[in-house]
Each structure stands twice: as structure tokens, then as C-alpha cells.
Image (spheres, rainbow, N blue to C red):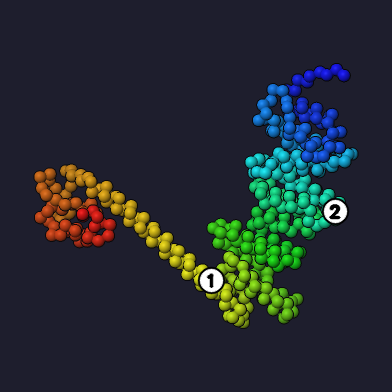
């Protein structure tokens, strides 16, 4: 064999070299090993720190996507490659196209694994759920279309709920859990999670939607079904954190016994009292901080007195001269010594400075 060194000066040439001569390796090697052709390189003239991003990931995905006819599928190759490129901290790579590729290939991997194992909850399902929860850069509208139209959409409830919550589509998520999945517990868990995730962590919009679904009138419902739905609504109100009384109570039937709401009402009153107490404490702390700031200002002003040609007595209206005795009050007024009776009371406004933070100014 005659070995000739190749002068590889660009990632495009090297990628083309891999594409032309290395597909036979990719077809038969385990995917985690085969993709190292693009991730574990030793290229002359390229620093090791830049090798991880030496190839354009979209071009590599096209190469891997064209592999066929071997023991390793193209889906497994693309999934293994993107797992290495994105890594554990997938948000470090903000390119939306890569994140969308990862979601799409994981959906295909779900289809492959379910066909092979005939299971409804595979490792690919879990990987897809984890990626949807962690990633902040995939296009939620595009991913929603894939999840809603896919062959396995009727069983990807948790994955769809994550995408719905990302877009604040609480109505779709709760309707999905109640009508498609028939899972009341999952609907409650979603409402709790969505409420905690709303601005300020105190919104109950998802709970409002859930209670509306349980209490809205339906002509097809019998009295027994209506009673059962009301009991479910009461269970949500009494057991789920984040439900506000002003949202829940108007939705219940007028003949609902107060005994069924006793635990909820007691908890709401206790929470209301706690919130009011916290507000009072916060207000007291704010007042204390304002007083401390005022005290610092007063102590600073106490150190300096400026008298100019425009300084006048607040009582008699005559000028304050340098050779006369005068007093300066905390509000800034000046008065001759003979013009005030009490040094703690402003002769013009009659404001008493003997109490509060102003008392320190007069010490």
C-alpha cells in the first residue's frame, strides 16, 4: 500500500471524506462508536479545543441520515451524535435547528423501540420527556404538531403536556388528560405544576380550567354523573395546593354542603391570615428601613449648616447674620434664638421634633 498524506484544510473536505469512505463503518459499528468519527478527531493544524465543533452538525446529521443497509439504523446514529453534541447541558447550544432535530429523531427512536419491544414506555420515551423538560430552544409549535399528529400521540401524554405548558395551553393539556387519557390524577398534577410555574408562583389559572371542566353543565350527564363530577371537584379543591377560594367557590353548585368545604375554608382563612401577617411584617421592615435612612440623612445634615445672604428667619422674616445666635430645625427652617420658645418646636410650622428619628437630631 502507498500511503499519501491528505492536506485537509477545511471541515467540508474532511466531512466529504467521511461521507465517501466511512459509511461502511457507520453501518456496522455500534452507534456510540461510529459517531466518534466526527467527535473524536486528531486533525493536523486544528487545536483540540476546536475539534468538537469542527464539523457543522447539520451537515453531519445529513451524512448519518443517509446511512442504510447495515445493522445500525440511521435513527440510532443521529440520536447518538446529537446526544454527544448537545451534551448534558443542552441549553449551552442555543441553535434551534439542532434542538428540533433532537426532538424529531427521538420521536423516530420511540417508534423503533416500541415496534421492537411492544412496550408503551421505553427508554426513548424517557429521553424524549427529559429533553423536552430541559431544552429551552426547540420550537414548541413545531414540536406540538409532531406530537399531536404522530402515530404514538395517544400515549405521549406527559411529553405533550410539557409542550402545552411551555405555550400556556392549559386548556388543551387538561382536556387531554381528562378526555383522552382519562387520568384525573395526572390532570391534578398538571394543574399544580402549571400554577407553580406561573408568574409569581401564585396563579391558579390551570385549576380554574380544571374545575370548569368538572363543573360545567352537560345535558348528556345524568344526575349520578353530575354528582360524581362535583365530588371530583371537591376533591381537587380540598387536596390540591394553589386553589384560591375566589376561583373555586363560584363554580360549585349552590346546594353544596359547607361541611364538604370545611377543610378548604379553614385552610384558605389560615393562608389569608398568614399572607396578611407577612404583609404587615414586610411593611414594618420597610418603615424601619425608611426611618434608618432618614436618621442617616439627619445625622449628615447635622454636621453642616450653610448660611448665605438668602438665609432668613422662618418666624420674623429677617436675615440670619453670622454674628447672631440661631437654630436650625430638622426640616431645614432657621430661626433667631429670640424668635422661638422651645428648641424642639418649629416656630413657623409648630411641628414637634421631640419624638421619632428627629429626636436624635436635637441631641
Q: Nearer the viewer, residue 29 or 78?
A: 29
Provide residue 293's location: percent of width, then percent of height. 33, 52
Q: For the N terminus, which image quadrant?
A: top right
User: What is the number of the mark on residue 268?
Assistant: 1
282 relative to 171 in the view: left or right: left
Tell me the crowding category of disc 1: few under 14, some 14 to 19, or many 20 or more residues within 10 angstroms, Cα based.
Answer: some
Instruction: Describe the element under mark 2 as helix, strand or loop.
Output: helix
- The residue to which callout 2 is attached is 117
Q: Quadrant of residue 180?
A: bottom right
Provide residue 216's location: percent of width, then percent of height. 67, 72
Who's the residue at 73% across and 62% down the image?
176
Tell me the crowding category of disc 2: few under 14, some 14 to 19, or many 20 or more residues within 10 angstroms, Cα based.
Answer: few
Provide residue 134's location: percent of width, then percent of height. 66, 49
Who's the residue at 65% across and 30% down the image?
49
> So how many labels did they put on this image?
2
Closest to the camera, between mark 2 and mark 1, is: 2
Q: Quadrant of residue 161?
A: bottom right
Amino acid at each position: 500500500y502507498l500511503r499519501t498524506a491528505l492536506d485537509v484544510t477545511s471541515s467540508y473536505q474532511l466531512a466529504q471524506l467521511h461521507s465517501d469512505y466511512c459509511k461502511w463503518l457507520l453501518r456496522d459499528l455500534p452507534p456510540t462508536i461510529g459517531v466518534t468519527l466526527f467527535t473524536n478527531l486528531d486533525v493536523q493544524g486544528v487545536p483540540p479545543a476546536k475539534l468538537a465543533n469542527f464539523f457543522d452538525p447539520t451537515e453531519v446529521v445529513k451524512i448519518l441520515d443517509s446511512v442504510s443497509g447495515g445493522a445500525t439504523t440511521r435513527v440510532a446514529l443521529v440520536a447518538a451524535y446529537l446526544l454527544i453534541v448537545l451534551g448534558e447541558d443542552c441549553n449551552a447550544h442555543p441553535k434551534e435547528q439542532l434542538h428540533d432535530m433532537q426532538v424529531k429523531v427521538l420521536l423516530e427512536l420511540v417508534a423503533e423501540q416500541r415496534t421492537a419491544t411492544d412496550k408503551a414506555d421505553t427508554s426513548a420515551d424517557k429521553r424524549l420527556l427529559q429533553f423536552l423538560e430541559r431544552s429551552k430552544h426547540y420550537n414548541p409549535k413545531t414540536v406540538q404538531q409532531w406530537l399531536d399528529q404522530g402515530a404514538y400521540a395517544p400515549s405521549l401524554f406527559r411529553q405533550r403536556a410539557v409542550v402545552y405548558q411551555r405555550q400556556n395551553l392549559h386548556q388543551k393539556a387538561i382536556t387531554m388528560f381528562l378526555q383522552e387519557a382519562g387520568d384525573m390524577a395526572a390532570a391534578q398534577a398538571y394543574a399544580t405544576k402549571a400554577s407553580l410555574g406561573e408568574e409569581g408562583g401564585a396563579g391558579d389559572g390551570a385549576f380554574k380550567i380544571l374545575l370548569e371542566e368538572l363543573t360545567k353543565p352537560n345535558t348528556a350527564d345524568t344526575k349520578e354523573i353530575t354528582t360524581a363530577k362535583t365530588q371530583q371537584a371537591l376533591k381537587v379543591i380540598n387536596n390540591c395546593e394553589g386553589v384560591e377560594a375566589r376561583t373555586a367557590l363560584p363554580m360549585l353548585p349552590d346546594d353544596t354542603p359547607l361541611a364538604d368545604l370545611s377543610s378548604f375554608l379553614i385552610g384558605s382563612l389560615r393562608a389569608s391570615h398568614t399572607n396578611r401577617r407577612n404583609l404587615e411584617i414586610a411593611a414594618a421592615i420597610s418603615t424601619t428601613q425608611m426611618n434608618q435612612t432618614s436618621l442617616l440623612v439627619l445625622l449628615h445634615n447635622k454636621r453642616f449648616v450653610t448660611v448665605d445672604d438668602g438665609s432668613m428667619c422662618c418666624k420674623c422674616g429677617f436675615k440670619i447674620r453670622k454674628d447672631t445666635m440661631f437654630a436650625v430645625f430638622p426640616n431645614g427652617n432657621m430661626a433667631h434664638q429670640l424668635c422661638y420658645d422651645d428648641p424642639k418646636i418649629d416656630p413657623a410650622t409648630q411641628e414637634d421634633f421631640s419624638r421619632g428619628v428627629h429626636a436624635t437630631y436635637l441631641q
